């Protein structure tokens, strides 16, 4: 009985991994930018958002996930993403299977108070009022671990009752001997947070480590909410 259950679990994981690969192998294109809450696109397919401190590697991870080099612009200048950027994944706009949302980086101390306030208001309004938002993936620099500003973001997500999952970045710059401790410390910090998903991923956009695992988690999420489509991806025009 246990062997049969183990075989079924293994088959399910393999199917989810393949579904994630197919999803992110499909077309993906920028469709919308919103600097104010009244400028959001109409809700349609599920959305997953990516948040994190400025310069944590959001754009690099989005490019790695979708197998593209310039889907999201990367920059060494913190605070470059100043709006909510929406990308249609898995089909043409209007028939996409999922939307990816690149959120403004938080914790950029050099920005003006007015700009920080505008970003914060935009993010809070989006998180609290977007029914199609299925999960927020919060990126944390794996070299440094959690900071106070990350905890403030977790507070906002908990108050908004939005499911979120932590993705540690820049694994290639972390010693192998420190990886497990970094994951355990992150899980411990999340243990009493009501909206946190109890699993942490560790990724490297440069080397591709953990990227397939993240694709699989997205496929698992879509399966859990009944929105997983395992058809072959539509080829870009």
Image (cartoon, rainbow, N blue to C red):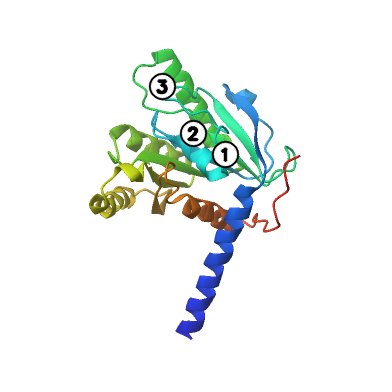
Q: Mark 1 near mark 3, Cβ–Cβ under 8 Å? A: no
Badge 3 element: loop
Please identify the quarter of the rendering in which residue 52 is found. Answer: top left
Residue 80 on image: x %, y %:
47, 22
Q: CA distance from mark 1 to mark 2?
A: 11 Å
As rendered, which of 35 and 182 lies closer to the eye? 182
Query: Which residue is disc 2 drawn over?
Result: 59
- Residue 40 appears in the rendering: no
Residue at far bottom of view? 1
Find residue 68 and name its label: 1
Q: CA distance from mark 1 to mark 3?
A: 21 Å
N-terminal of the two: label 3 or label 2? Answer: 2
Residue 113 as seen in the image, left or right of residue 128: left
N-terminal of the two: label 1 or label 2? Answer: 2
The local crowd at label 2, few if under 14, some if 14 to 19, many if 20 or more residues have their Cα within 10 Å, is many
Which quarter of the image is occupied by the C terminus? top right
């Amino acid at each position: 009985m246990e062997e049969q259950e183990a075989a079924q679990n293994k088959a399910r994981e393999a199917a989810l991994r393949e579904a994630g690969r197919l999803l992110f192998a499909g077309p993906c294109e920028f469709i919308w930018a919103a600097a104010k809450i009244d400028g959001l696109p109409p809700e349609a397919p599920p959305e997953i958002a990516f948040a994190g401190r400025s310069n944590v590697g959001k754009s690099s991870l989005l490019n790695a996930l979708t197998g593209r080099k310039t889907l999201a612009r990367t920059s060494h200048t913190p605070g470059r993403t100043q709006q909510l950027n929406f990308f249609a994944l898995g089909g043409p706009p209007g028939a996409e299977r999922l939307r990816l949302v690149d959120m403004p980086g938080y914790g950029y101390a050099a920005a003006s108070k007015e700009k920080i306030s505008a970003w914060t208001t935009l993010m809070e309004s989006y998180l609290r009022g977007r029914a199609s938002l299925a999960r927020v993936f919060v990126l944390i620099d794996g070299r440094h671990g959690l900071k106070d500003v990350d905890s403030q973001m977790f507070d906002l997500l908990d108050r908004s009752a939005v499911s979120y999952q932590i993705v540690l970045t820049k694994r290639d710059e972390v010693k192998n001997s420190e990886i497990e401790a970094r994951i355990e410390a992150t899980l411990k910090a999340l243990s009493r947070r009501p909206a946190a998903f109890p699993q942490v991923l560790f990724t490297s956009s440069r080397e591709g480590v953990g990227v397939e695992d993240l694709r699989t988690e997205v496929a698992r999420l879509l399966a859990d909410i009944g929105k997983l489509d395992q058809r072959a991806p539509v080829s870009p025009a």
